[in-house]
Amino acid sequence: AQTVTQSQPEMSVQEAETVTLSCTYDTSESDYYLFWYKQPPSRQMILVIRQEAYKQQNATENRFSVNFQKAAKSFSLKISDSQLGDAAMYFCAYRSELGPLRNRDDKIIFGKGTRLHILP
Amino acid sequence: DAGVIQSPRHEVTEMGQEVTLRCKPISGHDYLFWYRQTMMRGLELLIYFNNNVPIDDSGMPEDRFSAKMPNASFSTLKIQPSEPRDSAVYFCASSLKNADTQYFGPGTRLTVL
C-alpha cells in the first residue's frame, strides 16, 4: 500500500524568506499524481500544486514550486518570498494513476501535515 | 462555480442524537469524497462515490455512519446515534471524471457533547 510521510510536524520561516517542506512517499507504481494542499485557519483545503509523475519538469505556481525526485520518491514544496497569508497546515498527497476502476485503489493518500508559521 | 458547498458549517449536538451533514459537489464532477479530520488521526477518507454509486466505504468507522448520494448534486453523511468521539471536522470533496484534483468544501465542524 502507498504511504506518504511528512517528517516535519512544524516549521517556521521569516517573512519574505524561502522555506522548503519535505515529503516522501512509497509506491510500487510508475504512474501517479502528487499534490500539495494548504489548510489555513479557515480549515478549507486548498490545492496548491499538482505534479504528474510522468513529467520530469517540476511544477510551479507563482511563488510555489516543487522538487520532484521520482527515483528518490521525494516531493518537496518550496515557498519563495513567504507571506503572512502562507501560514497554514500543508498536506502532501498521493494518488494512483490507475484511476476510476472498481477494485483499484484510486483514493488520495494524505500525509500527516506540516504546520508552517510565518514570522513577521 | 460556487465550489463544493457543505452545510451546516457548525453543528453542536448531544450524544445519542442523529446528525446529518450535507454536501453539494461542483457541477459536472463525477466523484464525491467524504473525509474526517481530527488532531489525533489526521485526515481520513470515509467513503467515496463515482456517478452516485458508493465505491469504497472501508473508511466508515462503524454502522452508526451512513452516506448516500441520491443524485449527482447532493450527498449526505449521517451519524446515528452520535457519540462524543465523532467530534471532528468533516470535509466533502469532488473531482472530475478524468482529473485527479480534488476540490474540498469548507468543512463542517461537528461537536458531540
Image (spheres, coloured by chain):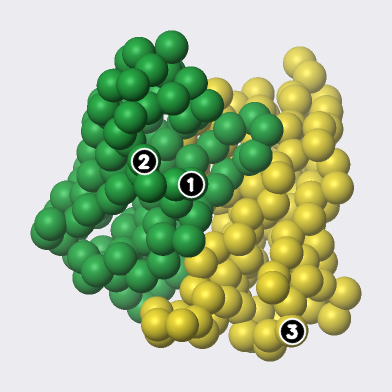
Q: Nearer the viewer, residue A60 or B99?
A: B99
Q: In the rendered picture, chain B carries what hue?
A: green
Residue at the spot of label 3: A28
Looking at the rendered image, the disc whose residue lies closer to the viewer, 3 or 2, is 2
Q: Nearer the viewer, residue B32 or B4?
A: B32
Residue A115 location, x and y as percent?
73, 32
Q: In the rendered picture, chain A carries what hue?
A: yellow
Q: Quadrant of the N terminus of chain A?
A: bottom right
Which residue shows up at 48% across the image and 21% down it?
Answer: B84
The 10 Å Cα crowd at callout 3, few under 14, some 14 to 19, many 20 or more, is few
Q: Amino acid at mark 3?
A: Ser
Label 3 – label 1 distance at C-alpha: 28 Å
The 10 Å Cα crowd at callout 1, few under 14, some 14 to 19, many 20 or more, is few
Please give left or right for residue A118 compared with residue A31 in the image. Answer: right
Which residue shows up at 41% across the image and 60% down it?
Answer: B57
Please give left or right for residue A10 compared with residue B66 in the image. Answer: right
Which residue shows up at 28% across the image and 39% down it?
Answer: B78
Q: Quadrant of the C terminus of chain A?
A: top right
Please give left or right for residue B55 compared with residue A41 in the image. Answer: left
Q: Is residue A7 visible?
A: yes
Looking at the rendered image, the disc whose residue lies closer to the viewer, 3 or 1, is 1
Residue A67 location, x and y as percent?
78, 64
To the question of a shared chain for discs 1 and 2, the answer is: yes
What element does badge 3 sit on?
loop
Q: Amino acid at mark 2?
A: Arg
What element does badge 1 sit on?
loop
Residue at the spot of label 2: B64
Q: Amino acid at mark 1?
A: Pro
